[in-house]
Amino acid sequence: MAKINRGDLRREVSQIILDHSTWGRGRIYDELCNRFGEDEVRNLIRERSVGNWIREIRNKPDDSLWKPWITDIKSEVRPSFLFTLQTIVSVIMDRGLLEREAQWAARLEIDLHALDPIAQYFVISEYSNRQAIGELEGKEIETGDLDTLLVLKPWTDDGKERYAQALDMDALVPPRIRMMMVPHENPSGADVFFSWRGCIQLGVPFQLMQESARNFPPVVSGINEPPTDKEDHLLNDHWFDVLMEYWRSVRESEKKSEGVTDEQA
């Protein structure tokens, strides 16, 4: 496990802001404590530091939302593809599709053909966030591990075989996709579930994702164990059915936390 430092935490704040532009410093600080461990974070920074970083990062790069039929998309793309991603983002991320995500979706639509839409969003989000982090840090975007997925397409029958051969020859860099990583501290069921779903649909081995994450700060990891038979339907059913089941579980949790019964709802 890589040891974290202030730079890792600042980079993580950037990542959180890119995904959740409306979160305040308290919620982000709590999220850091959850991901890295409360003692570890408090030994390095206080909540005030997070507030200072947010002011430096906010709106750089632009976090505008995609506006259907209004936003100018630079590459040709099917509207239904963007609307599908919008549905997935609204449930998983509790926000709309960002304009920069929509632009990447248009660039990647053909190469991601036949991949599960939930996994499509994970890949698109990773490209989008890496570009944004590169802009924040003044560095060129590095996407070799993701580009290999586009070339070999391990989610197809032929691609899975090619990907396995490339792995045996050490001819590729394992993918690092943040949406498919889970915190070391207190991972939620949703974290683990979507990591499982992404691995299965992408055709990338569980252990490969775990090893890739373990060797890269900030301290997040891949899943620890493969899913059991009882999770099979959630991992292989149609993406919309899976998304709705997840949405219902979120709503039920919200009702319980608010003390609302089904009759009152």
Image (spheres, rainbow, N blue to C red):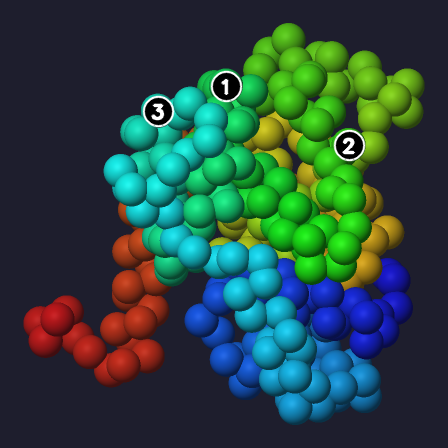
* Amino acid type indicated by mark 1: Ile
Q: How many C-alpha atoms fall within 10 Å of the one at disc 1: few (<14), some, or many (≥20)?
A: few
Question: Residue at label 3?
Answer: 78
Asked whether disc 2 touches disc 3, contact meaning CB atoms under 8 Å apart, the reply is no
Q: Earlier in the sequence, mark 3 or mark 1?
A: 3
Drawn side of residue 225 relative to residue 193, left or right: right
Q: For the point 36% across and 30% down, which residue is it?
A: 81
Q: Is residue 162 above or below residue 222?
A: above
The residues bearing labels 2 and 1 have C-alpha atoms spaced at a distance of 18 Å
Drawn side of residue 176 relative to residue 199, left or right: right
**Residue 185: where, in percent of width, then height?**
68, 70
* Residue 191 visible in the current orientation: yes
Question: Residue at label 2?
Answer: 144
Q: Is residue 159 above or below residue 115?
A: above
Asked whether disc 3 touches disc 1, contact meaning CB atoms under 8 Å apart, the reply is no
Q: For the point 74% across and 43% down, which residue is it?
A: 141
Looking at the image, the residue that sits furthest to the right is 169
Q: Earlier in the sequence, mark 2 or mark 3?
A: 3
Q: What is the quadrant of residue 253 in the picture?
A: bottom left
**Residue 62: where, in percent of width, then height?**
52, 57
Q: For the point 40% across and 25% down, which residue is it?
A: 77
**Residue 178: where, in percent of width, then height?**
64, 50
Label 3: element kind: loop
Q: How many C-alpha atoms fall within 10 Å of the one at disc 2: few (<14), some, or many (≥20)?
A: few
Question: Residue at label 1?
Answer: 110
Looking at the image, the residue that sits furthest to the top is 158
The residues bearing labels 2 and 3 have C-alpha atoms spaced at a distance of 26 Å
Q: Is residue 181 above or below residue 158?
A: below
* Amino acid type indicated by mark 2: Gly
**Residue 67: where, in percent of width, then height?**
31, 47
Most foreground residue, 149 or 225: 149
